[in-house]
Amino acid sequence: MSDEGQKNNQDGGMVEEPLDLVRLSLDENIYVKLKGDRELYGKLHAYDQHLNMVLGNVEETVTLREIDEETYEEIVKKEKRKMEMLFVRGDAVILISPPVRI
Amino acid sequence: MATLMEPFIDILTNDGRNIVGTLRGFDQLVNIILEESHERVYSSDGVERLHLGLCIIRGDNVAVVGLLDLDLDKRIDFSTLKGEPLKPVVH
Amino acid sequence: MSRISHNGQLFFSFFKSLVGKEIIVELKSDLCIKGTLHSVDQYLNIKLKDISVVDSEKFPHMISVQNCFIRGSVVRYVQLPSAEVDIQLLQDSARVEARELKKK
């Protein structure tokens, strides 16, 4: 890594490790996939090395899968709820997706 | 003999059990020693009490520890209290 | 949260700043416990006062409990009072924390 690269990284230009990408998503709307078929959309206000996070204006989607007893078809239900400010424990996080930039 | 000094506590374990007893000891790992303890099994036809006596609960399996208010607890008729079993903790 | 640097303990400091405020802790067993934040430790274990279980009709288990300890590792979410959160300070603290983590 060049000196210039290191310098850039200090104030947020370059990405050299995964957490840099998370840092660049601060104050942006992100998508988080969690264990247990849970997904979140919300504005990232804070995170740490464990991927604990605080998100604002969060929408959670829980996907429930049931098997219809007669037809054996899988019924997929999605439950949504909104929360103003949410702390998310990092151990349930599978992936974080930063906003799409133009 | 449960005295004022020895708190009566209510534990929810990771597998969804509810164990109640007198706290006789604990450590930093939240391992817990209970005396005169019993499990409360919730269902749609009242709460069943299962006697456990003296037991040690490993901290890993402890989700919640509550301080039980004995006066409040004595006023509850558990034979008619209906409740669903708790789901287990899924990590 | 008065200072911006938190020595790798950002959320520990953050929760300390919310002591006395009402929060809802959602466990990985789907149980939601509402109460006043009494204290927090470095593992993000939480002590609550004046608790009530959300949906206590279904889950009357904690009916005679007012104060409780929740193990940090069984927490899924904590719903926070957004009016009590200084968003700017929180984001700045997260940036400082990220920079300090890189130095190590």
Image (cartoon, coloured by chain):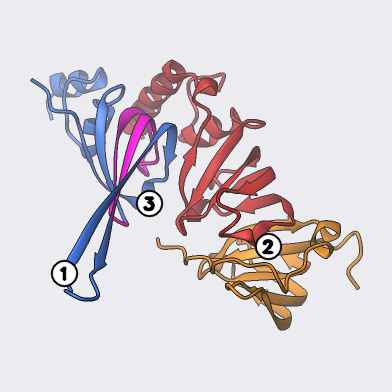
Drawing shade for chain A: blue
| Whole-percent x, y for residue C98 in the image | 35, 29
| Whole-percent x, y for residue B16 in the image | 53, 68
Residue with the mark numbered 1 = A73
Asked whether A96 or A72 is in front, the reply is A72
| Whole-percent x, y for residue B69 in the image | 80, 56
Q: Chain of mark 3?
A: A
Spatial separation of the CA atoms under disc 2 and disc 1: 50 Å
Residue closest to the far front? A70
Magenta span includes A54: yes
Does the magenta stretch mainly form a helix, a strand or a loop?
strand
Q: Chain of mark 1?
A: A
Residue with the mark numbered 2 = B27
Give the amino acid at mark 2: Asp
Instruction: Locate residue C61: give its quadrant.
Output: bottom right
- Residue A22 sits above or below residue B89 on the image: above
Instruction: Locate residue A6: give its quadrant.
Output: top left
Marker disc for residue A91? 3
Q: Which chain is orange?
A: B
Drawing shade for chain C: red
Q: Are marks 2 and 1 in contact (CB under 8 Å)?
A: no
Q: Are marks 1 and 3 in contact (CB under 8 Å)?
A: no
Q: Is there any visible trace of residue C54 in the rendered image?
A: yes
